[in-house]
Image: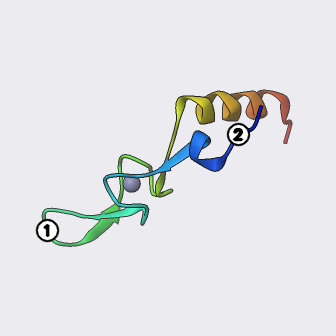
Amino acid sequence: MQISMDDLELPCWDCKGSGEVTSEEGTLVTCDKCSGTGVILTTLGQTLLSFMKKHLRQ
Ligand SMILES: [Zn+2]
């Protein structure tokens, strides 16, 4: 099974991947949708991330 990055995350459609959106006041604020990361995790991405977090001890 091959997994590409597109299967794990998609560019945020709210901020177009920049991580910031223009607020009503015209200032740049962190994008709520992606928490400023610029990408949205797919279901597969979330599954993989929770798996990694579960098994990775920091
Ligand atoms: Zn965003």
Q: Position of residue 51 (x, y in %)?
A: 74, 27
Q: Seen in the image, is 19 located left or right of residue 29?
A: right
User: Which color scheme did the rendering employ for the protein?
Assistant: rainbow
**Residue that protrudes farthest toward the left in the picture:** 24
Amino acid carrying label 2: it is Ile
Disc 1, SS: loop
Q: Position of residue 5 (x, y in %)?
A: 64, 49
Q: Which picture quadrant has residue 27?
A: bottom left
Q: At 54% across and 29% down in the image, what residue appears?
A: 43
Q: Position of residue 32 (x, y in %)?
A: 35, 49
Disc 2, SS: loop
Q: Seen in the image, is 43 located left or right of residue 4?
A: left
Q: Which picture quadrant has residue 54?
A: top right
The numbered dot on residue 25 is: 1
- Give above or below for 50 relative to 13: above
Residue beneath disc 2: 3
Whole-number angstrom distance, CA of label 2 to CA of label 1:
41 Å
Q: Quadrant of the C terminus?
A: top right
Q: At 34% across and 52% down in the image, what residue appears?
A: 13
Badge 2: residue crowd in 10 Å (few <14, some 14–19, many ≥20): few
Task: Please tell me in which quarter of the rendered image ligand 1 is found.
Answer: bottom left
In terms of sequence position, does the residue under pointer 2 or pointer 1 come before the other?
Answer: 2
Q: Seen in the image, is 37 located left or right of residue 54?
A: left
Q: At 49% across and 48% down in the image, what residue appears?
A: 10
3, 36: nearer the viewer = 3
